[in-house]
Amino acid sequence: MKPLLILALAVVLGCGSDGTTLEQSCAGETVPNCLPYEYAEIVSAEVTPERLPLDALGEELSIRVVFDKCDAAPRAHSVPLVVRVGGDDEGAGASLVTLLQLRDDGETDGDAVAGDGIIDVSVPNPFFDSTGVPANTDVFLRFQTRMPPDCSSGTCIGGTCQSEVLEIPYRTGPSSS
């Protein structure tokens, strides 16, 4: 009976799982919802300008996202730009609006280097009344790395790996319409 109890305790306590989630993933371990080497952690995110008017065609938003990842990551990570409107600090009661998908692929929206853990791009203004993002409102911009699925064999594997969320405050500008 005691060996079973010790085994159960080892499983519950995660025996053999030393280090951070990123360290475990980079050591080739599977971590919650991630295959080996897929996990990444957002280090920082910033956007400029501070306040972009809604519906302002011709305006651009510069976005820089930095994240730590495994050198052996099997594919380029993506980071959706999501706006959280309202709700409490945990997001309960909030409205989430996905504006666009950023990719660390060295191609999309001018990303310079594939797989370097830095997405530094300028994109056309993503803030429009039609998206449900209100004008002149304090919102949060949410960033979270995701590993897209591998469908190269005809059967998709993975695609569920995502990091913790990093939110930064942002104030939307006035409506241009």
Image (cartoon, helix red, strand yellow):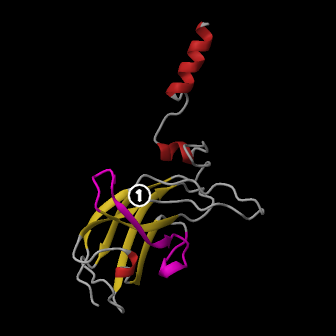
In-front residue for pair 49/23: 49
Q: Which residue is mark 1?
A: 42
- Expressed as whole percent of the image width and height from the top left, the position of residue 31 reads 55, 43
Query: Residue 113 lies in magenta, yes or no?
Result: yes
Looking at the image, which residue is at 24% across and 76% down?
A: 50
- Residue lying farthest to the top in this orientation: 1
Task: Look at 46% across and 67% down and name the residue there.
Answer: 80
Look at 61% across and 63% down and name the residue there: 75
Question: Where is residue 38 shown, x and y percent of the image?
Answer: 57, 54
Quadrant for the N terminus in the image: top right
Q: Given the current orientation, which residue lies at the most extreme right position?
A: 154
The span shown in magenta is 86-114
Compared with 78, 3 (above or below) is above
Foreground residue, 74 or 94?
94
Q: Quadrant of the C terminus?
A: bottom left
Q: Amino acid at mark 1?
A: Ile
